[in-house]
Structure formats: C-alpha cells, structure tokens
C-alpha cells in the first residue's frame, strides 16, 4: 500500500510540474479544437451528469469563443443514442436521440463555426472523416470524461497518426477536461491523475492550460 501511495504522489507531482502554453505558439490555420461530450446529459441533468463537468463549461466557452474565428476547425462530439443502442447495456440510459440530454450545452452552441458530430459510442474518432482534417497539425482536445471519452479519443487519434507516420500534435489542457465522482466507485481526482499521466506516456501533450 505504501508503494501505491508513493507512486500516486509521483503521478500528482508529474501534473503539478507541467507548464502552460500560449495559443499564439500554434499556427491557428492548422489548429482544430475538439470538444468531447459537453452536453446536457453529462453536464447538467440525467443519470450520468456531474457538477464537476458543469464547472468547466464557462472556462471552456471563454476559451473557445476567444479563438474559434481564427481556427481551422471546431468540432463538438455528443453522445446520441437510439433506445436499442448496445452501449446502453454497459451504462445507464443517457443522451437519447431527440432528448435534451444529447444536446450540446447552450453555452457552447454559439461558438463560431462549430460543427456538431453525433456519436453512438464513447469514442468520437469513429464518426470522423479524417480526410477533412488532413491539413491540421494541432488537435486541441477538451471535454469529458477524462478517463473515458477523452482518453479513448486522444489515444485512438494518436495511434492512427503513428500507424500512418503522420507527425501531429495532440494537446490536452488539464483545466478543460474533467470526469465524474462516485464515492468508493469512481474517484474523479484519482482517475484524472492516472489517465492524464497515461496520456503523457502515450505521446499526448498534456499542459496545465492554454493561455489566450
């Protein structure tokens, strides 16, 4: 147990020592913002909603609105399931098609040039037409949940680029990702720590924040 606690402290220290970056360090004509599952069902109401996720809506909206007009691409993924979706065998019913839960939160709906992509799994990669993003060098990924949809998306994206020998940057600002918390079942703080470190180990650029 002591070794586990020692390792966990090291993981926390890794994140505390991360730096911030400035948005102007990127060529915005070759940069896309990818917003994962910031919908009502995960942020505001329903079986899988979390106040932790709701807290990142405002800073995310401020960040996105400040840069959207200069970016090549702004995409928002949102869970959108039919009632017979296989995923609902693994999770409580959520984000049904036509229901308010599947709608992107109002605070993000008016981001300039935003493109909403509905997805029927935890991984937004599978609804992307990668040909549309071939000119991007930088993929900024924000949203929820750090350890599920965000994690699966950035790792699949990274392995796709590796497979095709494409040198791209995937950037995750820590202040704009979050996960839910359930006592004794799903520790939000611990899982943020573990999965952000795993992203780093897999070649994802995790930063404290991106300054605008």
Image (spheres, rainbow, N blue to C red):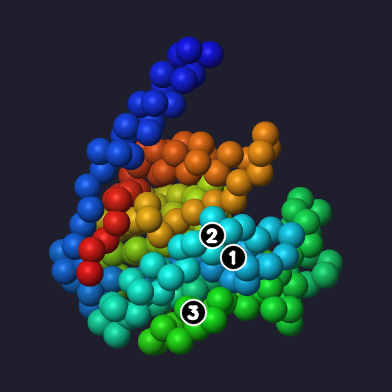
Write down the quadrant of residue 94 in the picture: bottom right
Write down the quadrant of residue 104 in the picture: bottom right
Quarter placement of the C terminus = bottom left
Q: Is mark 3 on a helix, strand or loop?
A: helix
Residue 55 position (above or below residue 11): below
Name which residue lies at 23% across and 74% down: 28
- Residue 160, percent from left and from top: 43, 55
- Residue 114, percent from left and from top: 44, 83
Report whether 99 appears left or right of 55. right
Binning the other alpha carbons within 10 Å of mark 1 as few (below 14), some (14 to 19) or many (20 upward) gives many
Q: Which of marks 1 and 2 is nearer the N terminus?
A: 1
Name which residue lies at 61% across and 46% down: 181
Report whether 152 appears left or right of 166. right
Residue 116, label in figure: none
In terms of depth relative to the viewer, which is nearer, 54 or 22?
54
The residues tagged by marks 3 and 2 sit, at their Cα atoms, a distance apart of: 13 Å
Kindly give the residue lying farthest to the top in the view shown: 2
Name which residue lies at 40% across and 38% down: 197
Residue 32 in sight here = no
Kindly give the residue lying farthest to the left in the view shown: 25
State the count of labels. 3
Q: What element carries label 1?
A: helix
Binning the other alpha carbons within 10 Å of mark 3 as few (below 14), some (14 to 19) or many (20 upward) gives some
Residue 193 in sight here = yes
The residues tagged by marks 3 and 1 sit, at their Cα atoms, a distance apart of: 11 Å
The residues tagged by marks 1 and 2 sit, at their Cα atoms, a distance apart of: 5 Å
In terms of depth relative to the viewer, which is nearer, 72 or 212?
212
Q: Is mark 2 on a helix, strand or loop?
A: helix
- Residue 164, percent from left and from top: 37, 56
Whether label 1 touches label 2, CB < 8 Å: yes
Residue bearing the label numbered 3: 107
Residue bearing the label numbered 1: 43
């Amino acid at each position: 147990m002591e070794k586990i606690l020692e390792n966990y402290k090291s993981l926390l220290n890794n994140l505390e020592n991360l730096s911030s970056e400035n948005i102007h360090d990127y060529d915005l004509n070759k940069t896309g913002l990818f917003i994962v599952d910031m919908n009502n069902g995960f942020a505001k109401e329903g079986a899988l909603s979390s106040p932790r996720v709701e807290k990142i809506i405002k800073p995310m909206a401020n960040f996105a609105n400040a840069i959207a007009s200069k970016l090549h691409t702004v995409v928002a993924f949102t869970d959108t399931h039919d009632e017979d979706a296989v995923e609902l065998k693994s999770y409580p019913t959520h984000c049904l098609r036509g229901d308010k839960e599947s709608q992107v939160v109002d605070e993000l709906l008016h981001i300039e040039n935003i493109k909403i992509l509905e997805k029927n799994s935890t991984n937004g990669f599978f609804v992307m037409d990668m040909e549309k993003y071939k000119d991007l060098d930088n993929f900024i990924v924000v949203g929820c949940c750090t350890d599920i949809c965000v994690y699966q998306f950035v790792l699949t994206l990274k392995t796709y680029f590796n497979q095709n020998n494409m040198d791209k940057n995937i950037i995750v600002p820590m202040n704009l990702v979050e996960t839910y918390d359930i006592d004794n079942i799903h520790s939000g703080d611990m899982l943020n720590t573990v999965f952000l470190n795993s992203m780093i180990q897999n070649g994802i650029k995790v930063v404290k924040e991106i300054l605008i």
